[in-house]
Amino acid sequence: MKKINQTILAVCLAAGTAGSTVAQSNTTVIDNEAPNSIVIVSLDDAGDEIIQIMNESQLPHVHDPQTPRFVLTDRQGNFALGIGGYVRTVAEYDLGGIVDNVDFIPSLIPNNGQTSNQIQMDASTANIYLKLVGNTPLLGNFIIHTEGNFRGSGKTFKLRNAYMAFKGFTIGYTYGGFMDASAMPSTIDFQGPNGGTFYRATQLAYTYKGLKNFQFNASVEMPEVDGETGNRFTISHQRMPDFTASAQYNWGNSSHLRIGGIIRSMTYTDNMDNTNHDITGYGVQASTTFGLGESIRMFGQFTYGKGIAQYINDLGELNVDLVDNPKEENEMQALPMMGWFAGLQYNICPNLFVSGTYSMARLFSEDDYATTAEDHYKYGQYVAANIFWSASPNMQLGAEYLRGWRKNFNATSHDANRISLMAKFSF
């Protein structure tokens, strides 16, 4: 035990020394002395206001990039353009059952179970972004953010965030209002807990922070609806946006409790008589993250609703926002569904932590849906245990074990296991 403690202490001290070396390397390069010249500086030299805007506008999800290391700024310090991102490579080995995806999604565990082992390597989550921040009399502090990775078809560039934010308004494509990115636990698995709520939407949102310790958010979002349509029905054009609202109470060091909801009207077409029909979906959610002392942090989320499969990780792969109604052959229906997770992170030292998460996603049956979909997914479970080491301020290494179960409506079940190794360099 003494040797283990000495090893951990050496790792922490080595990472801290590396951080000091990098921090001392800040430089300033000035192109010329003209009033409108551009100055290339490290972020620490960009000016207090610019640094504050950059840091406060950093997106909170575990897989979001850090603030950029270098920025372009005007001489007055009113505007700054940050260029950043990371390169991230993951090696995965599935044993005792596989998930048919580079992300660990229990609903994609094959029913046939013919393959029990596989190896995968993935670098498509490598990320690059541009962020323009500044201050003007009209807009106040504003942010223009564009970001993407390489998870498009054939590993092409795919947009992840593209929005502008000012005076509490957010306009563009980014995290939806019916989710809490900062309550998600750390995983190497890029999707994360199967019962977690995670999605992006084009939106108009407003956040109010005028009350001490409280913030309120409301958004109007572009809907996305999928379903098991068969030959009779079609889901294409939507007639109403999604509406979300949330209230959040903050305390201490990055701790909060958030309550939110969503309501949506989903349109489908009956091809037999070419008529449109609407079904109302809704969801409620509670989420939190809080610290217990200096070393322990808890994460949790619970979501329940109807017709919100698009927003729950596991269920989003199944196209079950709307499904056939076996009791009414000329109708579709929205099924009840649920997702939740609980996680704990223990910080061994500032550069080294371990964490564990348990999660579940479940689809419920109504109007005899289960009798016509016996081999369809009923619920899935997800367990993650991992360790992360920040070898330097820019380099992070990690290892993770994942286990997942899938159970169908006919009581058959299948499971999978995965071991993952990750190396990530941020810039």
Image (tube, grey):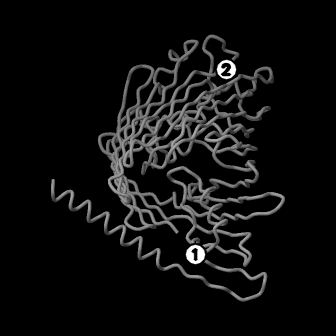
Location of residue 352 by image quarter: bottom left
Which of discs 1 and 2 lies nearer the camera? The answer is 1
> In the displayed image of the protein, which residue is found farthest to the right?
138
User: Given the image, on which type of amino acid does mark 1 rest?
Assistant: Ser
Give how far apart the Cα atoms at labels 1 and 2 are.
56 Å
Asked if residue 231 lies left or right of residue 89, the reply is right
Which numbered dot is residue 67? none
Q: Left of 31 or right of it: where is 426?
A: left
For residue 415, which quarter of the picture?
top left
Percent of width and height locating residue 22 = 45, 75
What's the residue at 39%, 49% (across, down)? 294
Please state which of residues 275 and 312 is positioned toward the viewer in this rendering: 312
* Residue that lies at the very extreme toward the left in this rendered image: 2
**Residue 124: where, in percent of width, then height?**
51, 58
Q: What residue did someone put label 1 on?
A: 42
Q: Where is residue 55? Give x, y as percent.
A: 59, 60
Q: Residue at x 36, y 72 (%)?
A: 17
Going by the numbered disc 2, the residue's amino acid type is Met
> x and y percent of residue 81 in the render?
68, 69
Per the image, the residue denoted by label 2 is 332
Above or below for 202 versus 68: above
Q: Residue furthest front?
A: 212
**Residue at x 70%, y 26% (from the top left corner):** 233
User: How would you rate the neighbour count of disc 1 (Cα within 10 Å): few for under 14, some for 14-19, many for 20 or more?
Assistant: some
